[in-house]
């Protein structure tokens, strides 16, 4: 099974002012990520505005997957470096989540990222059966625990049970609780070393890896992939002096990148730096003037 370690980018989807997808801009972003040393790519997650993308066969989502595959394959052939691809496959409809996982498997992805079912608010047993269903597809599954978006936290005792299912390869931990992250490492990863524990929040990269985690699925790395790779790698190497220096240097940006929502804030930051990002699709809108000032100041203060 592929090892998931380091900094992985939860990629944005660049768009033109009319709301259409900028596919060439997306290709440029993938190339930029690879050239800057990112450790893995995560298309079609929340940061990609996936709920608003066309998912019919041959449409926007399929084109995005195809571009990632093409560019990663070319990069791997050229460099010999393995770049894992984790394709977003979450839904609050279990049947759809299975279908998305099957699509990821067919595409040759290294894993599928499956979020806790949202809005429905299922019981613990319902959550377990949801992940049981996707685990049967036969592709490694990264569980995405983010109560702030789903309304449900996956407690550690439930994640322990889910982790015993076949093909459950790790968790994107965005509970916001260092204590819970440490429980997950202590109760699951310490018994199953190949179980990846990735931070779902840039600002928790340092403490999570210090506690024994594996890295981060990052929003900031859309704009600063090399710095996020260096932060994660320094911590994984045990060089916490360098890790702390990078963490505190980037801390204002970690705060600013969510100051008026995601991906609204990171798209504005990328536009400032001349990276393909562009517009957003409703219900997301451009950040406020106050947020623009906050993001501009963070970029300046962090010397980005």
Image (cartoon, grey):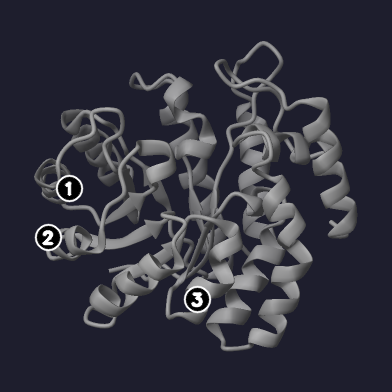
Left-right relation of 35 to 177: right
Residue 209 tag number = 3
Element at badge 3?
Answer: helix
Q: x%, y% of residue 23?
A: 60, 29
Frontmost residue, 78 versus 260: 260
Quote the CA–CA distance across marks 1 and 3. 25 Å
Q: In which quarter of the image is the N terminus?
A: bottom left
Left-right relation of 19 to 131: right
Q: x%, y% of residue 117?
A: 26, 36
Q: In which quarter of the image is the C terminus?
A: bottom right
Residue farthest to the top, as pictured: 18
Residue 172 image-quadrant placement: bottom left
Element at badge 2?
Answer: loop
Q: How crowded is mark 1: few (under 14 residues within 10 Å), some or many (20 or more)?
A: many
Frontmost residue, 219 versus 53: 219
Q: Name the residue under label 1.
A: 131
Instruction: Kindly tell me whether residue 144 is visible in this rendering.
Output: yes
Mark 1 or 3, nearer chain start: 1
Give me the residue at 19% from left, 37% from top.
Answer: 98
Q: Name the residue under label 2.
A: 165
Element at badge 1?
Answer: helix
Give me the residue at 62% from left, 39% from top.
Answer: 27
Quote the CA–CA distance across marks 3 and 2. 25 Å
Give me the residue at 63% from left, 67% from top.
Answer: 229
């Amino acid at each position: 099974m592929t090892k998931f370690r380091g900094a992985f980018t939860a990629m944005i989807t660049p768009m033109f002012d009319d709301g259409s997808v900028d596919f060439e801009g997306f290709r440029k972003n993938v190339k930029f990520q690879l050239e800057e040393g990112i450790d893995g790519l995560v298309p079609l997650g929340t940061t990609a505005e996936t709920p608003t993308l066309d998912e019919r066969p041959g449409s926007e989502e399929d084109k995005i997957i195809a571009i990632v595959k093409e560019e990663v394959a070319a990069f791997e052939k050229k460099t010999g470096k393995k770049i894992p691809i984790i394709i977003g496959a979450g839904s609050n409809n279990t049947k759809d989540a299975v279908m998305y996982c099957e699509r990821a498997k067919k595409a040759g992805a290294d894993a599928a990222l499956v979020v806790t079912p949202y809005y429905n608010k299922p019981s613990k047993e319902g959550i377990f059966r949801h992940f049981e269903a996707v685990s049967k597809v036969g592709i490694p599954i990264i569980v995405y625990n983010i109560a702030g978006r789903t309304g449900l936290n996956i407690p550690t005792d439930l994640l322990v049970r889910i982790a015993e299912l076949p093909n459950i390869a790790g968790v994107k931990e965005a509970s916001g609780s260092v204590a819970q992250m440490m429980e997950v490492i202590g109760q699951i990863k310490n018994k199953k070393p190949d179980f990846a524990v990735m931070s779902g929040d840039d600002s928790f990269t340092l403490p999570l890896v210090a506690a024994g985690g594996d890295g981060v699925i990052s929003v900031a790395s859309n704009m600063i992939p090399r710095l996020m790779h260096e932060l994660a790698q320094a911590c994984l190497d045990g060089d916490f002096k360098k890790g702390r220096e990078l963490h505190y240097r980037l801390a204002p940006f970690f705060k600013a990148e969510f100051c008026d929502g995601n991906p609204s804030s990171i798209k504005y930051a990328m536009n400032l730096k001349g990276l393909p990002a562009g517009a957003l699709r409703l219900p997301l809108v451009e950040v406020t003037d106050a947020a623009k000032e906050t993001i501009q100041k963070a970029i300046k203060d962090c010397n980005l």
